Image: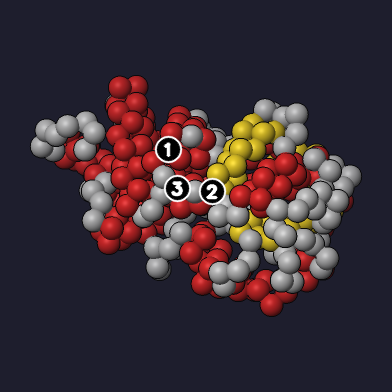
Amino acid sequence: MSGESRAGSPVAVLGAGSWGTALAIQLARSGRPTRLWGRDRVRLAAMAQERRNARYLAAGDFPPSLTVEPDLENALRGATDVLVAVPSHAFRSVLSEISPLLAPQMRLAWATKGLELSSGLLPHQVAREVLGPKRAVAVLSGPTFAREVGAGLPTAMTIASPDGGFAKTLARDLSSEQFRAYTSTDIVGVEVGGAVKNVLAVGAGLSDGLGFGANTRVALITRGLAEMMRLGVALGAQRDTFMGLAGLGDLVLTCTDDQSRNRRFGLELAAGKTASQALADIGQVVEGYPAAKALRGVAARAGVEMPLCEGVYQVLYERVPALEAVRALMTRPIKPERD
C-alpha cells in the first residue's frame, strides 16, 4: 500500500542540481539510504570524492547514507521511492526514460515547478500521460531555497498527493528537527502555485530593478496572489491552498529574496540586459521565463484574466518596455478588489 512506511528502503533522487542535491541531503539526514543521480558523470565523480556539490550547493556536506550514482538503472534498482528534481522542460523526457525501469510498487514524487511549454500541462498531468493513472505520485513545493535546506536551516514545505497516505509517509521521511513537511491532497493547487509564483517573481525583480519601491512590490504580490487563486480555482484547485506555504508563502519568498533566480532575472532585465544575457549570467534554469509563455496559453483556455502575468509575458516576449507595461496596469478600469 502506498501509505506504508518505507523509512529503511532506498530512495533515488534524480537530478543533481541545487534542489535535487538539497533534497537528497535532507532525506539522508532523516535516515533514508539515498542515491543521487545526474547526467554529468565528471561532476558526479567529483561530488562523490568531495562529498558535496561544489558547483551548486557548496555549503551542504553529504551525510554518510547519501551515495552518488552515475548509472540510472543502478540508482533505481531496489528503490521504493523516486524523487525527480529536474527543470520542467526535462520532466517528460526523464519520466519517459525511467518508465520501463520502474517496478509497479515504486512511488514517484517530484520537486519540478512549472508548466510544460508545448502543452501547458502541469507536472502531475504529464506524469499521468507518461506513467498512467495507477502509480502513487506526489509533488513537493513551498517556500524553500536549496542553499538553506542544504545548510540545515529551519524550513517548512508542502507535500501534495491525491494519495493522502503517500503524502504522509513522504512527509515523515523528510521531516527532522530542522525540516517540517506538511501534507495536502490538492496537487493541482500546489502545482499552480509553484508555476505562477515564478512568473510573478520575474515581475517583482523588474519592479524593484526599476526603482518602483515597496508599495509597488507589495501590490504586485497581493494582486498576483489573486491571479494565482483565479487560475487555480478554474483548474480545480482549492482556494485555501493558496493561503498556505505552497501559495502565499512561496510567492512572498520568491518575490522578495535575491536567492530567487526568477527575481534576479527580472533585476538583470531592468538593468538593461537582454533575456539571453540575463539567463547566461545566472547560469541555471529560470523557470519563470518559459512559464510566462506557457501560462498565457493556459489562462486563455481557462478564460482567466491575469494582467500581471500578461504584463511579464509582454516584457519578455513582445519587447514591451517595463515602464509601459506598468503604466498599462495602472490605467486599467477600476474594479472591486475581490475581482
Q: Which residue is mark 1?
A: 240
Q: Are marks 3 and 1 in contact (CB under 8 Å)?
A: no
The amino acid on which the numbered mark 2 sits, given as a three-letter code, is Thr
Of the numbered discs 3 and 1, the one sitting upstream in the chain is: 3
The amino acid on which the numbered mark 3 sits, given as a three-letter code, is Gly
Residue 294: x and y in percent read: 37, 59
Residue 328: x and y in percent read: 16, 40
Give the label on residue 207, or none: none
- Of the pair 23 and 7, the residue shown nearer to us: 7
Task: Measure the C-alpha gap from mark 3 to mark 1.
Answer: 9 Å
Q: Residue at x 72, y 64 (%)?
A: 106
Quarter-wise, where is residue 1 in the image?
Answer: bottom right
Task: Measure the C-alpha gap from mark 2 to mark 1.
Answer: 12 Å
Q: Residues within 10 Å of mark 1 (few under 14, many from 20)?
A: few
Give the label on residue 189, or none: 3
Q: Which residue is mark 2?
A: 185
Tell me: 204 left or right of 128: left
- Of the pair 123 and 94, the residue shown nearer to us: 123
In what element is the residue under mark 1? helix
Outermost residue, right direction?
64
Q: Quadrant of the C terminus?
A: top left
Quarter-wise, where is residue 203 in the image?
Answer: top left
